[in-house]
Image (tube, grey):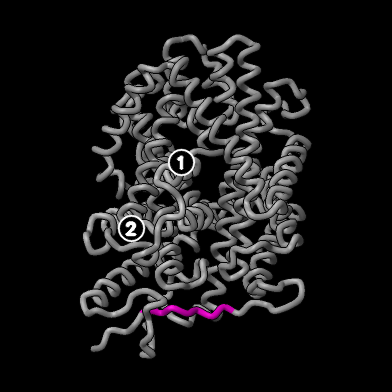
């Protein structure tokens, strides 16, 4: 049976004129209707929206917990496989004479920039502190809560959520996008990554469904990230003295504070997006990098240095040795409130399953970024750089920042000042324990500025990614109304869901929205594996595997 040449053309109809010129109208309009409908529903019928979303969330956590665990394991094992096998590892994301656009140092620096962000500023302190009080090892009686005995398990579970699993899911999307864009010459959009499975049928309704699922997942994934950022931003400006009106009596951000924060963040990000070709993003990214290194350096020098370094190396050892079992562990409730199995299932649903859904929802956004900066690199170099480097940076942040918070609590210096405050405020509380009032105020301002730059760049980049998918992979400048719409849509989704039910409402919507795209990601992984295998066969037979080299008119696969 003759080996068919690869598919190197995927027509996607775009408008030639009018408001949607250059856009795939069916994708753009459908995505806008779905996201707009969610906002209207949450604002007009908050009780009904809250009830329905909560019911769907409970159903997914009970019925699809195994799915999220197993697909994340599949992404990780796929990355290991394609990097380890010689035939696939040496393949280049591009043509043999393509050279990387960025030096290895710059490329790794950008991976570092992607590896820390809003979530890291929120969770680097909060997650180790939480796991110190409760995690599966404590539930099963293997460690005593809130003691030095629980430190190792706290770091292990934090590393699980921010380590190889997360970045393997991003790497799969980026690998598939880069492979088919740079080797096959296909549009840089999600549907292109499924051509080995569905061929030119992706030019029709099937491709529409896939791209719309990616847009909705991206909106909800970024909304989750922005929701954390808004809460922490409000907590920060409250710390530096902007008034008690920012918080409710329960310590949560007030509706007025949410509105003001979103107006500042989305307004700045929209101006950045309108500034064209990365001017705003480049400027803000430079600030990000300087302030991030300054904050990390502060904790390295003035934090619990020895405790943090010990947490880093011991935590990595514990995480890697436990990883084979953690890959496939699923806990199901026995229906008895308070039983060990019920506690484990609740913990996994609230932490691991939430994270796996978050990473899936965020994967189109991060994956497209990874693809764009990785042209000319081999698959092995790409996987090692995209999975290992950011994971290590996350481990360093958790060990130094979270380790300092843990040491302050265990030593009695904090006197529950860190544990006793909200997740969004724990980094600021740690600084307040470490420093006198004046220095704590100065560093809190630095964190607020750093947080603001991350929020703006995340929202800015999300709008650009969403418009790229809507425009059939065209990365060129977009008309102002489309930038304004998606900037406003992100603000409304975050604001509506925060006011509806706080971060829990955003988390619920995100877990629901991520489920369809998780299936798309599995198909992307299968698709790229098939493409690599078929290209290996073509190379053995001396046939073309790259788009300029394909001259055969035999029907494509």
The stretch of residues the image draws in magenta is: 6-12
Mark 2 lies on residue: 378
Residue 268 locus on image (x, y percent): 72, 44
Depth check, front residue: 229 or 79 = 79
Residue 543 visible in this rendered orientation of the protein: yes
Indicate which disc residue 109 carries: 1
Secondary structure at badge 1 equals: helix
Earlier along the polypeptide chain: callout 1 or callout 2? 1
Q: Quadrant of the image for the C terminus?
A: bottom left
Question: Image point 42% across, 75% down: which residue?
Answer: 195
Depth check, front residue: 134 or 235 = 235
Question: Image point 22% across, 59% down: which residue?
Answer: 85
Q: Quadrant of the image for the N terminus?
A: bottom left
Residue 371 locus on image (x, y percent): 46, 58
Q: Is residue 100 magenta?
A: no
Residue 221 locus on image (x, y percent): 56, 51
Residue 154 left/right relative to 235: left
Indicate which disc residue 225 carries: none
Q: Is residue 9 magenta?
A: yes
Residue 87 image-quadrant placement: bottom left
Residue 285 left/right relative to 142: right
Residue located farthest toward the front when viewing the structure as drawn: 97
Depth check, front residue: 286 or 401 = 286
Residue 387 locus on image (x, y percent): 37, 47
The main secondary structure of the magenta stretch is loop
Residue 253 left/right relative to 98: right
Secondary structure at badge 2 equals: loop
């Amino acid at each position: 049976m003759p080996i068919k040449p690869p598919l190197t053309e995927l027509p996607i109809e775009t408008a030639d004129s009018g408001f949607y010129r250059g856009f795939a109208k069916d994708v753009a309009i459908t995505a806008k209707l779905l996201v707009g409908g969610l906002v209207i529903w949450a604002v007009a019928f908050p009780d009904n929206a809250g009830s329905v979303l909560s019911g769907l969330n409970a159903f997914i956590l009970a019925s699809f917990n195994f799915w999220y665990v197993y697909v994340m394991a599949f992404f990780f094992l796929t990355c290991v496989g394609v990097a380890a096998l010689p035939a696939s590892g040496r393949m280049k994301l591009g043509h043999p004479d393509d050279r990387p656009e960025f030096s290895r140092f710059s490329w790794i620096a950008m991976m570092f920039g992607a590896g820390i962000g809003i979530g890291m500023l929120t969770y680097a302190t909060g997650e180790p502190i939480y796991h110190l009080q409760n995690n599966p090892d404590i539930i099963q009686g293997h460690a005593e809560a809130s003691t030095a005995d629980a430190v190792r398990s706290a770091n292990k579970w934090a590393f699980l959520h921010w380590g190889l699993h997360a970045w393997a899911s991003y790497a799969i999307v980026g690998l598939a996008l880069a492979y088919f864009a740079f080797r096959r010459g296909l549009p840089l959009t999600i549907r292109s990554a499924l051509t080995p499975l569905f061929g030119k049928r992706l030019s029709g309704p099937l491709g529409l469904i896939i791209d719309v699922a990616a847009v909705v997942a991206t909106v909800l994934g970024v909304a989750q990230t922005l929701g954390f950022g808004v809460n922490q931003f409000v907590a920060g400006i409250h710390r530096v003295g902007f008034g008690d009106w920012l918080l409710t009596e329960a310590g949560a951000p007030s509706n007025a504070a949410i509105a003001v924060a979103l107006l500042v963040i989305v307004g700045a990000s929209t101006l950045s997006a309108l500034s064209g070709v990365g001017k705003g993003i480049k400027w803000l990214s430079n600030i990000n990098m300087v302030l991030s290194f300054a904050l990390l350096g502060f904790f390295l020098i003035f934090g619990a240095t020895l405790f943090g370094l010990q947490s880093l190396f011991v935590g990595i050892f514990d995480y890697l040795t436990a990883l084979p079992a953690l890959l496939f562990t699923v806990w199901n409730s026995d229906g008895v409130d308070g039983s060990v199995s019920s506690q484990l299932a609740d913990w996994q649903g609230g932490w691991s399953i939430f994270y796996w859904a978050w990473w899936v929802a965020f994967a189109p956004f991060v994956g497209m970024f990874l693809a764009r900066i990785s042209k000319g690199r081999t698959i092995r170099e790409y996987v090692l750089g995209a999975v290992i480097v950011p994971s290590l940076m996350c481990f360093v942040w958790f060990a130094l920042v979270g380790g300092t918070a843990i040491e302050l609590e265990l030593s009695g210096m904090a006197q529950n000042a860190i544990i006793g405050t909200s997740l969004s405020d724990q980094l600021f509380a740690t600084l307040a324990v470490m420093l006198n009032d004046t220095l704590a105020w100065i560093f809190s301002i630095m964190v607020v500025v750093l947080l603001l730059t991350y929020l703006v760049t995340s929202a800015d980049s999300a709008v650009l990614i969403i418009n790229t998918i809507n425009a059939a992979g065209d990365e060129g400048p977009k008309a102002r109304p489309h930038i304004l719409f998606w900037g406003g849509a992100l603000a409304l989704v975050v604001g509506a869901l925060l006011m509806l039910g706080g971060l829990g409402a955003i988390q619920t919507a995100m877990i629901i929205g991520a489920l369809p795209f998780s299936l798309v990601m599995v198909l992307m992984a299968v698709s790229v594996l098939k493409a690599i295998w078929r290209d290996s066969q073509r190379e053995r037979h001396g046939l073309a595997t790259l788009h300029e080299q394909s001259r055969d008119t035999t029907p494509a696969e």
